[in-house]
């Protein structure tokens, strides 16, 4: 079912049955956002993909794969409902329209607070050092306040320092916090009151992780790509050379979004990341007016949409016809793969196989834990020995 929305995107609403199947699939072993998309497009629906998982993983060399149960999915949905939250699916109203355009966009996000806030395309991320200076926090406060007054929603990661300062300054207009853990896990705990204010004052809390998930170090890069993906541009205020905030800005560049950086003293290591970004082509800014001027060339609400290509059929009993893949085809793909990432298109050309057959074999290997996906539609074997 498709309907036209005022946010400019094509909207759809999943049934309860479909939503539960989507959640089971994305919570199953070795299934990430890209794999989810490939599985549903291959099988025709999330339910059909769930049924196909054991055979696909076995063909890839893994005899047993953990599939999230119906009860686990229903429990997670119920837990979200109890705290006033819910799940938004890729393509549904309330799923951030700019995030839809990002490769590897999560098929489901957990949301607490305002779905209307998430439907906006007038969004700017502000990120920076956790151990921010007073001057850095003041700049973040000023920029966030002025952006909010100009009608923009400020997006950040609820961290100490710059993130917290930006969120607090944008509370009156509504702000979006993206979490590395579950939508119910407040990190750091000292921002508990800020978390509640964001949800209560026309803002939104967002996460792609399971309910109750405690964030690990490797979960923060996933969060950072969502922060930049939700936003038209990312503003960096104080960041060390190898900081997570700098990674957020680089994600923004990879996603063809605007990158802004506030310059700082070359004697302060917290300014090294931003100064390097400026040297590499980021837009130097000192106030919100600089950001607004750069964003004037972007027509809000009319962003080019990536096609909604996760195909849930109207009738779940009519999945796509499976493609036959032989052992010789699998051997040909395996012989072409190694530890060095290669583009999928290159792999298809080299093997001479039908594109869909190669995608199925890649799926089998990934579900078996033998293949890793990389940015730029590249894949490699996990262990090429």
Image: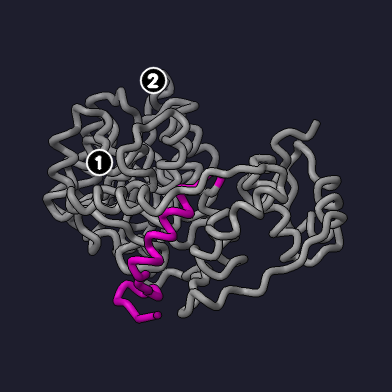
Q: How is the image coloured?
A: one colour
- Element type where label 2 sits in the image: loop
* Residue 33 colored in magenta in the image: no
* Most foreground residue, 222 or 185: 185
x, y percentage for residue 212?
30, 38
Q: Is residue 332 visible?
A: yes
* Residue 256 visible in this rendered orientation of the protein: no
**Where does residue 99 sit, x and y in percent of width and height?**
42, 58
Of badges 2 and 1, the one in the foreground is: 1
The earlier-in-sequence mark between 2 and 1 is 1
Residue at horizontal 28 percent and vertical 44 percent from the top: 183
> In which quadrant of the rendered view does residue 369 lie?
top right
Mark 2 neighbour density, 10 Å: few (under 14) some (14–19) many (20 or more): few
Range of the magenta residues?
A: 1-30
Q: Residue at x 38, y 39 (%)?
A: 236
Q: Residue at x 22, y 28 (%)?
A: 189
- Find residue 337 and report its horizontal and vertical position in percent: 79, 44
Image spot of residue 218 (x, y percent): 47, 32
> Which quadrant, please, contains the N terminus?
bottom left
Measuring 29% from the left and 76% from the top, which residue is drawn there? 6
Extreme-top residue of the structure? 267
Q: Determine which quarter of the picture holds residue 380.
A: top right
Position of the C terminus, as image quadrant, is: top right
Is 15 covered by the magenta stretch?
Answer: yes
Q: Is residue 330 left or right of residue 305?
A: right
Side of 253 where 362 appears, left or right: right
Relative side of 96 to 257, left or right = left
Query: Label 2: which residue?
Result: 268
Q: CA distance from mark 2 to mark 1?
A: 35 Å
Using the image, tell me which numbered label, if any, was put on residue 38.
none
Using the image, tell me which numbered label, if any, was put on residue 184: 1
Q: Mark 1 falls on what kind of element?
A: loop
């Amino acid at each position: 079912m498709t309907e036209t929305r005022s946010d400019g995107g094509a909207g759809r609403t999943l049934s309860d049955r479909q939503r539960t199947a989507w959640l089971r699939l994305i919570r199953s072993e070795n299934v990430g956002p890209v794999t989810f998309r490939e599985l549903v497009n291959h099988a025709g629906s999330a339910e059909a993909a769930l049924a196909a998982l054991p055979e696909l993983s076995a063909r890839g060399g893994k005899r047993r794969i953990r599939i999230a149960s119906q009860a686990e999915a229903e429990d997670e949905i119920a837990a979200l409902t109890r705290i006033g939250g819910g799940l938004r699916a890729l393509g549904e109203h309330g799923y951030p329209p700019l995030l839809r355009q990002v490769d590897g966009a999560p098929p489901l996000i957990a949301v607490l607070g305002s779905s209307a806030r998430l439907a906006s395309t007038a969004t700017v991320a502000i990120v920076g050092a956790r151990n921010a200076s007073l001057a850095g926090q003041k700049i973040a406060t000023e920029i966030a306040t002025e952006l909010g007054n100009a009608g923009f929603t400020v997006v950040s990661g609820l961290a100490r320092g710059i993130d917290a300062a930006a969120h607090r300054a944008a509370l009156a207009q509504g702000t979006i916090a993206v979490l590395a853990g579950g939508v119910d896990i407040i990190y750091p705990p000292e921002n508990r009151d800020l978390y509640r204010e964001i949800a209560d004052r026309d803002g939104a809390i967002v996460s792609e992780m399971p309910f109750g998930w405690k964030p690990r170090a490797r979960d923060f890069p996933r969060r950072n790509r969502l922060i930049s993906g939700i936003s038209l541009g990312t503003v960096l205020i104080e960041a060390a050379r190898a900081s997570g905030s700098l990674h957020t800005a680089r994600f923004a560049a990879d996603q063809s979004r605007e990158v802004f950086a506030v310059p700082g003293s070359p004697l302060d290591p917290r300014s090294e990341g931003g100064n390097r970004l400026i040297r590499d082509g980021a837009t130097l800014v000192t106030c919100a007016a600089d950001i607004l001027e750069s964003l004037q060339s972007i027509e809000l609400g009319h962003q080019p949409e990536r096609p909604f290509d996760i195909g849930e059929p109207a009738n779940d009993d009519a999945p796509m016809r499976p493609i036959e893949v032989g052992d010789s085809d699998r051997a040909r793909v395996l012989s072409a793969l190694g530890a060095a990432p290669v583009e999928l298109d290159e792999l298809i050309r080299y093997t001479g196989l039908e594109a869909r057959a190669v995608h199925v074999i890649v799926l089998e290997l990934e579900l078996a834990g033998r293949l890793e996906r990389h940015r730029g539609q590249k894949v490699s074997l996990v262990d090429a020995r």
